[in-house]
Amino acid sequence: YAKKKQSSAIQIFNSDLFRAFKEDAQIEKDLHWAIRGRQFELYYQPLMDLKTHAYIGAEALIRWHHPKRGVLYPGVFIDIAEQSGLINTIGAWVLEAACRQLDQWQRHNVDMAMHVNVSARQFFSGNLYEQVWQLLNRYRLKPQSLILEITETELMEDIRYATNLCQELSELGVGLAIDDFGTGYSSMRYLKQFPISKLKIDRSFISDLSVSRESREIVSAIIAMAKALNISLTAEGVETLEQEKFLADNLCHHAQGFLYSPALREPEFAQFLFQSNSRLAATTH
Ligand code: C2E
Ligand code: MG
Ligand code: MG
Ligand code: MG
């Protein structure tokens, strides 16, 4: 009986694994079409200045309008794109689309920073600098309004290469942000060594603020450190007024999260900005 039970457990395990494998293979296949079929779209999530309550930037977040499965989030396909190498094509598209949008904002005197996520493979591909340089020129962008988000773990994959590339990118004038800060293993020494302009505190610390004294200590320590190093700081995943108050009291610079808005498609994002700016103008005058 035990043997039978065990073998059926293995069978279930195998068929689950097989299904997952088949699903990944299907996603990879569909990804080829997605690029050619213009199925990707960037959504924009606003970043708010905690002192002025003005929106100072947006993070571009990719969404996939899958013809059969509806809207897919990056969690479902970015890893597969990364493993298959398709991320280079997708990442180049993301950068282009984000810069095109940033150009639109700058033409309309909307002074917003555009944050773009860069994956490890894209970062180490050897042509990120070239891509960024070309886009800054093609769209005549203010370089400081483009901010590339990279995770600590990515940077640590090849510290020498990463240091050089970060140096070159910062000489172009673009900003560099460390994404999901606190979840990786970068040391203070490297923080000093990389020309980083911004840290984004991972949302796991923010969601724990009300229940975990440790998270409160960690967040205020990160804030103090960022201040000492003269690095601007964004808290990710802010969902409650209580979290916002803690961050504002501790002088964290910027906040991003569902409390303000999820990522929106361009027309809704523009409307969101317009409405919140008028509200802000009404309360400050
Ligand atoms: P991330 O860069 O840390 O982006 C923030 C993620 O947190 C987004 O998920 C956003 O929708 C979500 N988020 C924002 N505010 C809140 C909140 O208050 N509560 C909660 N629970 N979540 C919140 P999303 O869009 O699903 O993206 C997931 C990850 O996929 C991103 O994490 C980023 O690492 C990656 N990603 C997204 N777009 C791109 C892209 O264009 N290129 C690359 N390489 N990666 C991307
Ligand atoms: Mg990010
Ligand atoms: Mg990221
Ligand atoms: Mg993040």
Image (tube, rainbow, N blue to C red):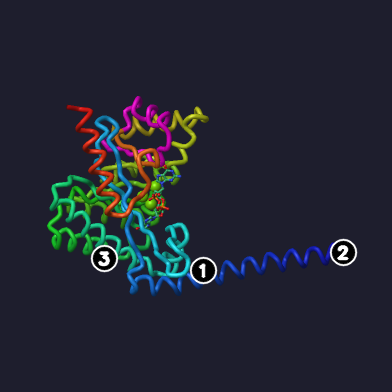
For label 1, count other residues whose C-alpha is less than 10 Å away and answer few (under 14), some (14-19) or many (20+).
some
The residue that disc 1 covers is: 24
Residue 280 or 222: which is nearer the viewer?
280
For label 3, count other residues whose C-alpha is less than 10 Å away and answer few (under 14), some (14-19) or many (20+).
few
Judged from this view, the residue extending furthest toward the top is: 249
Q: Distance between the residues labelled 2 and 3?
A: 59 Å
Q: Earlier in the sequence, mark 3 or mark 1?
A: 1
Q: Which of marks 2 and 3 is nearer the N terminus?
A: 2
Residue 223 falls left or right of residue 216: left
Image label count: 3
The kind of residue tagged 3 is Asn
Q: Quadrant of residue 185?
A: top left
For label 2, count other residues whose C-alpha is less than 10 Å away and answer few (under 14), some (14-19) or many (20+).
few
Magenta region: 230-252
Residue 121 or 147: which is nearer the viewer?
147
Residue 108 or 251: which is nearer the viewer?
108
Asked if the residue under mark 1 is in contact with the one under mark 3, i.e. CB atoms within 8 Å, the reply is no
Q: Which mark is residue 127?
A: 3
Asked if the residue under mark 3 is in contact with the one under mark 2, i.e. CB atoms within 8 Å, the reply is no
The kind of residue tagged 2 is Tyr
231 in magenta: yes
| Image location (x, y in percent) of residue 161 | 31, 57
The residue that disc 2 covers is: 1
Q: Residue 281 carries which label?
A: none
